[in-house]
Image (tube, rainbow, N blue to C red):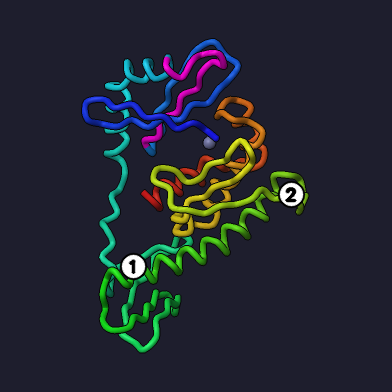
Amino acid sequence: MTPRELVTYGGRSIAYEVFRADRTTLSITVNPDGVVEVVAPLGIALEDIRARIHRRARWIANQQRYFEQFLPRTPPRRFVSGETHLYLGRQYRLRVVVADEESVKLNGGRFVVHVVGGPVPERVEVLLGQWYAAKASERLTERLEECWKRFSGGCASDVPPLRIRRMRSRWGSMSSSGLLTLNVDLIRAPRECLDYVILHELCHLEHADHGAAFRARLEQVLPDWERRKHRLELTLA
Ligand SMILES: [Zn+2]
């Protein structure tokens, strides 16, 4: 598991992840999604890393603000008829219908949500959330199996265990014990982007950081990963 650390600076919390590498210098990177990554020499104490983050906090905050301006803001969902919701990269218009029984269906290019009593947005949100969670479980499991075959060179067994949950600031993670965690919101993204996230995390089974060896492995298994990553950022920003 990548340790997730927190430093507070001028009222802003800076979360960062520490990767250890056999190197002598420490590097701090702010990704376009705002996630801060630290690659640290093996011997350096977490306290010292924290101090370094503190010293660079102003620069980090500036970087994060710089990237924030490029993020197209999705307006908050209101869960009423007429607005659109994403599934596997496509926009579907929502239609809320009062009915005797609750259900969610994807029908003729629309999300049709049947809700009992009245079109209460909170209830629509719950029903849609359950639908997304079920689809995420189904589709992400299926994509993991496909990606695993690609990653392992055709092996269909020993697929890493998968856990799906809501994650605040990342699409996935790989624990040191080999447990893959994926963000349930990925199910809104195009399938090729799901594969990118899964293969990225599978590469962490072999390389903990994002160094040259990691990139080489990712490039080998998914040569157009950068295009997919970009598409993911555009779709779900
Ligand atoms: Zn990673």
Image quadrant assignment for residue 63: top left
Disc with the residue nearer the chain's start (1 vs 2): 1
Which residue: 66% across, 33% down? 206
Q: How many marks?
A: 2
Please name whichever residue, 170 or 1, is drawn nearer the observer in this view of the structure. 1
Question: Is 89 left, or right, of 221 in this rendering?
Answer: left
> Residue 178: horizontal and vertical position, in percent?
64, 41
Residue 233 in magenta stretch: no
User: Is residue 136 left or right of 235 when viewed as pictured?
Assistant: right
Q: What residue would you read off at disc 2?
A: 158
Q: Residues within 10 Å of mark 1 (few under 14, many from 20)?
A: some
The CA distance from mark 1 to mark 2 is: 36 Å
Region of the chain picked out in magenta, as a range: 34-47
Q: Quadrant of the N terminus?
A: top right
Residue 31, given in percent of the width and then of the height, sits at 41, 33
Query: In percent of the image, x 65 and y 37: which residue is there?
Result: 205
The residue carrying mark 1 is: 125
Q: Residue furthest left?
A: 10
Vertical order, 7 against 74 (above or below) = above
Disc 2 marks a residue whose amino acid type is Asp
